[in-house]
Amino acid sequence: MTPVDTLGRPLRDLRISVTDRCNFRCVYCMPKEVFGRDFKFLDRSQILTFEEIARLAGVFVGLGVEKIRITGGEPLVRRDIEELVGQLSRVPGLHDLTLTTNGSLLSRAKAQALSDAGLRRITISLDSLDDEVFRVMNDVKFPVSVVLDAIDSALAAGLTPVKVDTVVRRGMNEAGIADLAGRFRGTGVIVRFIEYMDVGNTNGWRMDDVVPASEVVARIAERWPLEPVDANYFGEVAERWRYADGAGEIGIISSVTRPFCASCTRARLSAEGKLYTCLFASKGEDLRALLRGGASDDAIAARLSVVWGARDDRYSEIRTSNTPRGPKVEMSHIGG
Ligand code: SAM
Ligand code: SF4
Ligand code: SF4
């Protein structure tokens, strides 16, 4: 039976981080000063194998999870990730399987391999069309053109609808919001603008750096009038807006200014097998110990139900500028 938490929210989505490593150092996620040469990433033996992940996924789906997103760190730095996609796509009862990537390693061949393995659609992160701005934000001087090629590769492989996720950070990329929206108008690609969040402890977040969702909508609507669209389903994170002239839609993820904890049905599994019930959690439940300790699927399911049943997370609803920023898990550790 699907577990329901103390606030009446069922367990429906699972985000699986397959690695804590990444080839980018986005300033809002893995700042170089912290994730430098001396940073100690997880060892291979500490991270879950594909078989362990697929087994846990089966237990989650048995409990009512309908949607799985593979994330990271950068999921495509994990070798043969399409093998995991294949294993997850064969989990009976799973309705939706997707993956979030920075696109840097998404060649035509990789996109096709992921599609052949059973990936249905994909989200590619891109913060700006301006090469200078993008290079500063990813902080490894990675060019925009390669990510645009990755988007084309995803389209060619039928990983649709392709979504493009853009984190908006004040003073960095807000001037390019409308250009990004314009680039994908009429292409079927859905751009989603995400408010910069205070995840983890390392990105030096300040409320002043957040560009509110209302401002993002206003900047785009100035050029192309927008109208709101109803959510696709309960718990959808992005607010949907469509162009009045029929050129498609955009999404807005306003986790800071209009939080959506009341409908948050997401669990997160870290690369080392810890279960987090909130993006802003400080502690996770060690599922790897259960797996490697010989627990049965039923015993794991029972534990998951207890953990979810006790859940009362609603960090974004109670956050203020003064919220103490205690130790929290890093975004690169549990994925977005
Ligand atoms: N490396 C992949 C990527 O960048 O798409 C997947 C993992 S990344 C942690 C997932 C998403 O989280 C990305 O779209 C990224 O832009 C977003 N993200 C990271 N740090 C964030 C922050 N502080 N606030 C809002 N979104 C953030
Ligand atoms: Fe890497 Fe994604 Fe974080 Fe950027 S947002 S540092 S690409 S994990
Ligand atoms: Fe869900 Fe936590 Fe984000 Fe609220 S703050 S929407 S409970 S992950």
Image (cartoon, rainbow, N blue to C red):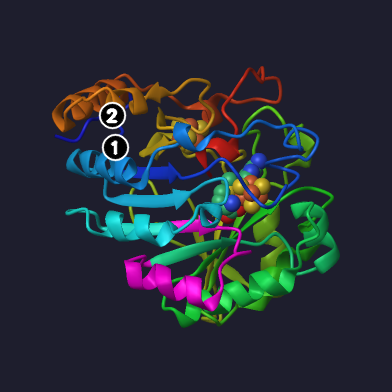
Q: Is residue 317 visible?
A: yes
Q: Residue at x 70, y 20 (%)?
A: 322
Q: Earlier in the sequence, mark 2 or mark 1?
A: 1
SS assignment at label 2: helix
User: Which-is-in-front pick, marks 2 and 1?
Assistant: 2
Q: Residue at x 33, y 48 (%)?
A: 234
Percent x, y of residue 67: 32, 51
Residue 291: assigned label: 2
- At label 1, the amino acid type is Leu
Left or right side of 61 for 121: right
Residue carrying label 1: 11
The N terminus, quarter of image: top left
Residue nearest the viewer, comparing 104 with 148: 104
Percent x, y of residue 331: 58, 38
Q: Is mark 2 within 8 Å of ligand 1?
A: no
198 drawn magenta: no
Q: Local crowd at mark 1 within 10 Å, few (<14), some, or many (≥20)?
A: many
